[in-house]
Every structure is written in structure tokens, then in C-alpha cells.
Amino acid sequence: MVAQIEVLTSREVPLGGPRAMRVRRTLPQRHRSLIGAWCFVDHFGPDEVDQTGGMVVAPHPHTGLQTVSWLFEGEIEHRDSAGNHATVRPGELNLMTSGRGISHTEVSTDATTVLHGAQLWVALPDATRDAHPGFHHYAPDPVRGPGWEVRVFLGEVLGASSPVPTHTPLLGAELMLAPGRTLEVEVDEAFEHGVLLDVGVIEVEGAEVKPSDLAYVPHGRRTLTVTAHEEARLLLLGGPPFGEAIVMWWNFIGRSHDEVAGHRRAWMEQVEGGLTDGRFGLVDTDLEPIPAPVLPNVRLKERR
């Protein structure tokens, strides 16, 4: 901890059922669940696909959230039950809104030899969490300055902005820094921020951050200073404190244990009923859907 900066280290977890790839997760953690509305941060790769098998995530459901896919290398094919079919490429945003319920697949393409990127979730506020599912694709142009380059995929920073609408104020950007560069970034003081380091070694307000670490910066700051000790690439995330309690389990976000249990029950009715259409719809794929795990024996706790 340096000047209120908290560095969250990652833990390795499997992603995607029986053929799971390994990812490094920094959010949520026991003592910190959200940064703004950002509630889930996975960092993966660079992985040689011929050794790891790449990403093969069969149909699975979501409620109450948005998925944000951002790649540094490789390609992922996205299909969802709302009929969206898109390819995730480096430097391009794919944002899927689950609303009341959606299911989707994520599979690395045959052309992919190295897979490297981040999978992020955003919690939807109570006012819109039951909205219809949606999808946005956006390829931001880079904005450059002395020793830095930024691609803003949500919100605005460093003179660049994204047209993609959000349900709460958000910031999401990829930032490249040259070796030895110190950059003072003007930020919204109402936002808390997270800095996820992909490659390099940096300091955030004097706190050392290593690859796959996530530095948490509380709200109340008008500037954020980042120093690169070697060439660095990072994701800058932000938003005002979310202000709502959520219950988050598996792929669902709700507001109570019973609500999430109901989402699980609805998904399993679809899976066990021979892939009948239902709350989460059907994905056009030959992959078998992922069954939901068993709920824990204790009631799910709220996260704030």
C-alpha cells in the first residue's frame, strides 16, 4: 500500500468447463468486489494455442451484467442467443449486455496461434438490469502523445472518447507507455480506478505493479501518475462507486440468494429439458451447454 494504492495480485482459475483454459483473476476478491461497476477481471496469455487448446467456452448463461472482451493477440468467435455473431480481434471492443438473460459461446478461431487478452464484467444497475439483451462492437482509433498511446473503448480519457453507451459512468482504455515514461493522467475525481498491467513493470502513484496485478485507486483524485520502468501495456478501468449491493455467483448477478438460485434453476431446466428455448435463449452451435455448478450449502452473501 502506497498513498492509498492497493495492489491486488491474481489467482489462477479454470475458465470454460471440462476443457478449461487457465486465467489469472484479480476481481472479485474477498475484500474488494467492485471498482466502479467493474466486477470481474480476468487476464490470460500469451498462450500457445497448439499447447493449451485455446479458448473453447460452450454455451453458458448470464444475467444482470455486461461482458467486455479485449484482446492483445489472437481472435475469438462470439455467438449468442440474441442472434449476434462477431469476431473479437485485438484492439476492438466486443460488449455483450445480458440484461434479463442471455447465453453465448466464446471459441478461439482456427487462425489463432497465440491467445492473449482480458475478459471483464460490468454490473448493471437495478434500473436496467432486466433490460433486453444487446451487443456493441467498436474499434477505437489510437490517440498518441510523447511516449504514450491510448485506445479508449468506454468513456473518455487523454483527449479520446468512445461512443459506446453505458448504463453507469465508466472508463475503459488500453494504454501503452514507452520505457522510462511518466504520464500524469487527468481523471474524474468521482471515479475509483483500477490499473491492470499486461506486460512490463510500472508504478502507480509510487506503488509497484507487476504483470497481471490490478492496482486499485480510490476516488477523490484528479490525476493518476503512472511510470513505466520498461515498455508497458495496461488497461485503465474506472467508474464512480457502484452504490448497490449485488449477489454474484457463477455467471449470474442478482440482488438476492433466491434470485440467483432462480436463475440457476431456469438455466438447468433449459439444459436438462433437451435444450428447450427459455429465459436464456439458444445459441447456434454444436457445443453442449455447460451445466451450472451446485449452489453452496450456505446462502450467498451480498457484495458491496
Image (cartoon, rainbow, N blue to C red):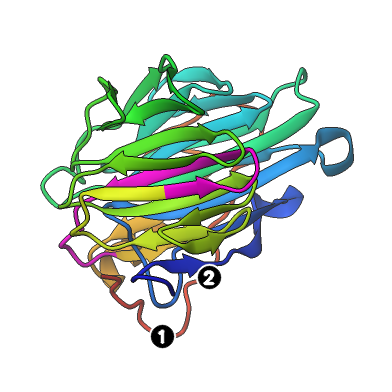
Where is residue 114 drawn, in percent x and y?
Answer: 77, 31
Residue under the image location 44 percent in, 77 percent down: 30
Q: Residues within 10 Å of mark 1 (few under 14, many from 20)?
A: few
- Left or right, 239 with respect to 294, comes to left
Residue under the image location 48 percent in, 64 percent down: 207
Indicate which disc residue 294 carries: 2
Which residue appears farthest toward the right when viewing the image? 51
Indicate which disc residue 298 carries: 1
Where is residue 204 drawn, in percent x and y?
Answer: 45, 56
Which residue appears farthest toward the bottom when viewing the image? 298
Residue 99: image quadrant is: top left
Quadrant including the C terminus? bottom left
- Left or right, 108 with respect to 49, comes to left
> Disc 1 residue type?
Val
Q: Which marked residue is nearer to the observer: mark 1 or mark 2?
A: 1
Where is residue 19 drawn, in percent x and y?
Answer: 75, 48
Indicate which disc residue 30 carries: none
Q: Residues within 10 Å of mark 2 (few under 14, many from 20)?
A: few
Identify which residue, 124 or 190, lies in the foreground: 190
> Disc 2 residue type?
Val
Residue under the image location 58 percent in, 21 percent down: 89
**What segment carries the magenta color?**
226-246
